[in-house]
Amino acid sequence: MARYDAGEAGGAERFAALAGQYRAEVKEVLGPLVEAYHPALAAAGGSEYRKMLELSAKMALVGHACTEVAGETFDAGRRRLAILFGGCCFLADSFLDDFGDEAARAYLARFERLLRSGWFEIRNPRERLFYVIVALMFTERDVLAPLLRQAILALHAAQAEDVMLRLEPWRMADLARSRQLRLLRRSARNRSGHAILALSIFLVQNIALSYLVGLFTAGSLIMFIDDHGDCHADLREGRVTYMNRLRDPERALRRIFAGHCRRIEASLEPGPGRALLLGFLERYYRSRLAKHRRQRAGGGAWDVYE
């Protein structure tokens, strides 16, 4: 596997040091919100709540890297915002993936209404927690600022495309395999790529446009890594992704990882932010290779990094 510049390998060690710090901080930020607005989330066996904390810690780590890439300090306010963004993403993903087709369609329509009118009718505790987190995020930033507004709308559009490909398979049924793979690859790239752009712009609203290509590339790589890690679970649930349609997904991911890291290096200036981002990506890549192999051998869900 081709490696990025060995001079930045210290990003992996820095990732390890920060991971424990952010896992603790995530509990401090999200724990009181869950207890106040949806206590059943933490009480119901705990696995889903732990997954929420892990995703939010991941967003804090990536947010730290993106903030430093932009030349800013990842201070307490930005750490809190990145953690809230992670909690929001976790809940949104659950609406899209965990409660059936109609729930996914309803979430897309209802969130579009929120973006258009500012109104979100709360129907249950999970939605109440989601709305509270969204409201806390939106009060921290001017969401009508053009760059942030476009990032949020692009993320919503990418989510909608991903859901439609899943819920309406007839859209791809008559297409050649190569065209199907291109659609699935674009959908995976956009969903996570735009998520990281939205996170970055939430954290640094005046971020230079020149950084966005590299950050989008990093975000898209995260989705390919995730989909490989979940390949067998997705197949069992009948979920089609780009990675589980490939004949040799591990070999393909090795090429994708090396190519994306080279593009990140070419797009972002050397420094602690780029080093942390690349260190995180390598650690995450290796952990998801292990997750894939564990699930192939019959292992169950695995929601932590390692």
Image (tube, rainbow, N blue to C red):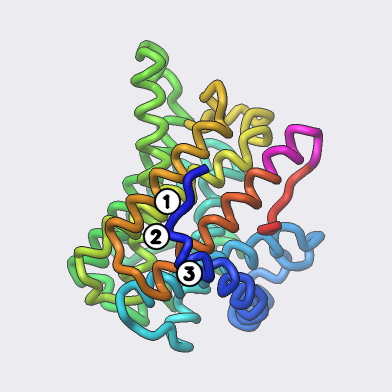
Is 234 on the left or on the right of 246, as rendered?
A: right
Amino acid type indicated by mark 1: Ser
Amino acid type indicated by mark 3: Leu
Q: Which residue is mark 1?
A: 192
Residue 97 lies in what quarter of the image?
top right
Q: What range of the chain is rendered magenta?
A: 291-299
The percent position of residue 171, horizontal first and vertical second, equals 37, 21
Rounded to the nearest angstrom, the CA distance separating label 3 from label 2 is 15 Å
Residue visible at 42% across and 75% down in the picture: 272
Disc 2 crowd rating (10 Å Cα; few below 14, some 14-19, many 20+) is many
Q: Is residue 17 above or below residue 284?
A: below
Is 71 on the left or on the right of 284, as rendered?
A: left
The percent position of residue 151, horizontal first and vertical second, equals 28, 59
- Pick whichever of labels 1 and 3 is earlier in the sequence: 1
Residue visible at 36% across and 45% down in the picture: 190
Rounded to the nearest angstrom, the CA distance separating label 1 from label 2 is 6 Å
Q: Are marks 1 and 2 in contact (CB under 8 Å)?
A: yes
